[in-house]
Amino acid sequence: MLNLASPLQAGKPMKPKELMITLIALCIMIASLRNIHASGMSSTQIFLDQVYSGMAVKLNATSETVPGQNLTFILSITCRSLDVTVDSLNVSIYGYREGKEKTVLLSRRCITSATPLEFNQTISYQNDTTVPGDVWDTTYAELQCAYRIADEPKRLDKMVAITYVRNIYLEDLERRLLELNETYQQLWKNYTKLNETYWNQGIIELENTRRVVAILVVTTVFFIATTFYLVLKKPREF
């Protein structure tokens, strides 16, 4: 591991060779991070990996996507017996509009005529489809395969839950609701603070008013008493 801080800590400038090695290491790190990010965005998941009579079926698809983006599926069939012939193979992918109404996203006939397979031979089919803007929730892949082992007819019908399509509209509403709730909480705090200030100010003003009234009452009583006293002490005329 490169010690990038040691030349600076020693107070010595980095040599051209050390600087070049450091730059190369940084470039490799940045490229690795980009590759990890890219692989995470386009990652697929195994949704079906099972052995049936005479064949093994494996289905990979995009693990998660959003409306308006692509959904990728990869179907692989490996022959596990001698004298296997596939007569037909159909793949359909279904989604749900607004999470309720079933709709076909993709329908493909991979094999339409008799196709013999050799032992351990693998055939693969890959396709991409764009998820409509009003489709979300879990999608499903339906496999329909008619085949024969020697002259014995076989049939494979399988429905598999695959890619999850995020409801970005609901996520946006939840985000806005959270923001509104935070705004409401802040406004409520401000209101409570202002209300407390108002009542505290009102109490102070009420106390001041009481003091003024008391002073006026005392002054008035004193004035009346003084006046009454002066009237009583006024000299009588002879």
Image (tube, rainbow, N blue to C red):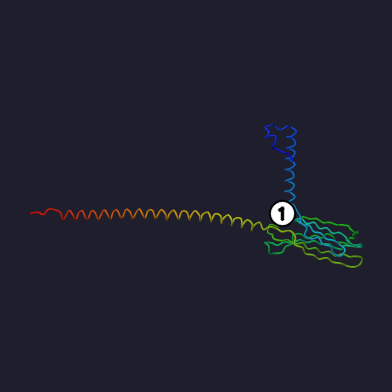
Q: Position of residue 130 (x, y in %)?
A: 73, 55
- Residue kind at label 1, given as amino acid type: Gln
Q: Residue at x 86, y 67 (%)?
A: 154
Return the x and y of residue 203 as percentages of the image width and height: 39, 55
Q: Nearer the viewer, residue 232 or 45?
A: 232
**Front in this rendered view, residue 134 or 54:** 54
Instruction: Locate residue 42 relative to residue 85 in the image: left or right.
Output: left
Residue farthest along the bottom direction in this orientation: 152
**Could you say where residue 155 lies in the image, as x and y percent from the top left?**
84, 66
Name the residue: 68% across, 62% down.
99
The front one of 111 and 199 is: 199
Q: Quadrant of the N terminus?
A: top right
Q: Residue furthest front?
A: 10
Q: For the residue labelled by badge 1, is the local secondary structure a helix, a strand or a loop?
A: loop
Identify which residue is drawn at 74% across, 48% down: 36
Left of 183 or right of it: where is 112? right
Location of the C terminus (image quadrant):
bottom left
Dividing the picture into quadrants, the one containing residue 183 is bottom right
Q: Residues within 10 Å of mark 1 (few under 14, many from 20)?
A: some
Tally the marks: 1
Residue drawn at x 71%, y 54% is 69
| Figure quadrant of residue 62 | bottom right
> What residue sits right under mark 1 in the picture?
69
Residue 66: % across, % down: 69, 55
